[in-house]
Image (spheres, rainbow, N blue to C red):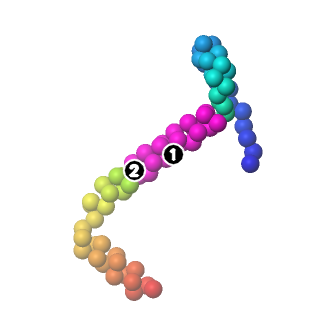
């Protein structure tokens, strides 16, 4: 697995406390970023689903039935 460098500025006092506590900054930041990425992906997915549901409201139930029947015939 390849890695990349991310630089960030934090308050000096915070940096000193992190060092004093011996925290593993890399692990903490990586975990926080992974959680945020997962959260944003889920938000994006929900938005796409909601948009799709809105689009589907415009399709009549009879059209859905016909589409399902046609798909079954194609098998």
Q: Could you tell me which secondary element the residue under label 2 belongs to?
A: helix
Which residue is depicted at the point 67% across and 25% down?
22
Depth check: 19 or 31 in front? 19
Q: In which quarter of the image is residue 52?
A: bottom left
**Residues at marks 2 and 1, CA–CA distance in whole angstroms:** 12 Å
Which residue is depicted at the point 75% across and 45% down?
2
Q: Can residue 53 be seen in this view?
A: yes
Mark 1, residue position: 38
Q: Main secondary structure of the magenta part?
A: helix
Up-down: is 38 above or below 11? below
Region of the chain picked out in magenta, as a range: 27-48
Q: Which mark is residue 46?
A: 2
Up-down: is 12 above or below 67? above
Which residue is depicted at the point 51% across and 45% down?
38
Mark 2 or 1, closer to the camera:
1
Residue 40 falls inside the magenta stretch: yes
Q: Where is residue 16 in the image (x, y as percent from the top left)?
A: 65, 16
Horizontal side of 55 relative to 3 (left or right) equals left
Residue 3 falls inside the magenta stretch: no
Q: Where is residue 68 in the image (x, y as percent from the top left)?
A: 34, 78
């Amino acid at each position: 697995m390849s890695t990349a460098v991310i630089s960030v500025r934090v308050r000096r006092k915070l940096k000193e406390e992190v060092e004093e506590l011996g925290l593993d900054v890399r692990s903490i930041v990586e975990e926080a970023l992974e959680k945020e990425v997962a959260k944003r992906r889920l938000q994006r997915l929900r938005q796409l689903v909601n948009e799709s549901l809105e689009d589907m409201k415009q399709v009549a139930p009879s059209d859905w039935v016909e589409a399902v029947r046609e798909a079954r015939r194609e098998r």
